[in-house]
Amino acid sequence: MRLSACVFIVIPLLGCSRAQRQDKSPSTGNVANDMLHDLNEQQQATHLAAVVEEGCVGTRAFYMGIDAQHSAFWGVGCENGQSYEVMIDNMLTEQRR
């Protein structure tokens, strides 16, 4: 699948802290990524589409991986047929640099 755009972001996802998160899955070292993993696919797509904007109404979300600095990569598919890659920076790593 060809991604039509690339969006790099730092998001305070859901306004939730790590302490408020129910530990459903192991930590990836990226709090926002961990919270996205805890959501169902439709909720993931909705949150990722809101970040992308571009008229995207999210229909699917797919996790693409995480790099050595704990930046996470997700894809979101939109109702209009477009797909976007979203990078979620690890804010904790960025603060330590």
Image (tube, rainbow, N blue to C red):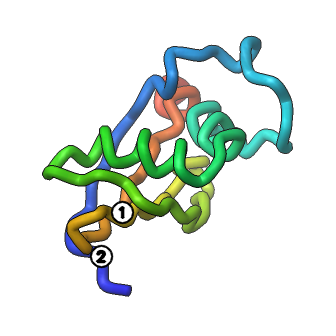
Residue 49's place in the image compared with 32, above or below, is below
The N terminus lies in quadrant: bottom left
Give x and y (percent) for residue 56.
24, 53
Q: Residues within 10 Å of mark 2 (few under 14, many from 20)?
A: few
Give x and y (percent) for residue 47.
43, 39
Q: Residues at badges 1 and 2 in contact (C-beta under 8 Å)?
A: yes
Q: Residue 3, labelled with which disc?
A: 2
Q: Is residue 96 left or right of residue 57?
A: right
Mark 2: which amino acid? Leu
How far apart in space, not on screen, are marks 1 and 2 (Cα)?
A: 7 Å
Q: Is residue 37 left or right of residue 91?
A: right
Nearer to me, 96 or 7: 7
Q: Residues within 10 Å of mark 1 (few under 14, many from 20)?
A: many
* Secondary structure category for the residue under label 1: strand
* Secondary structure category for the residue under label 2: loop
> Mark 1 highlights which residue?
85
- Mark 1 or mark 2: whose residue is earlier in sequence: 2
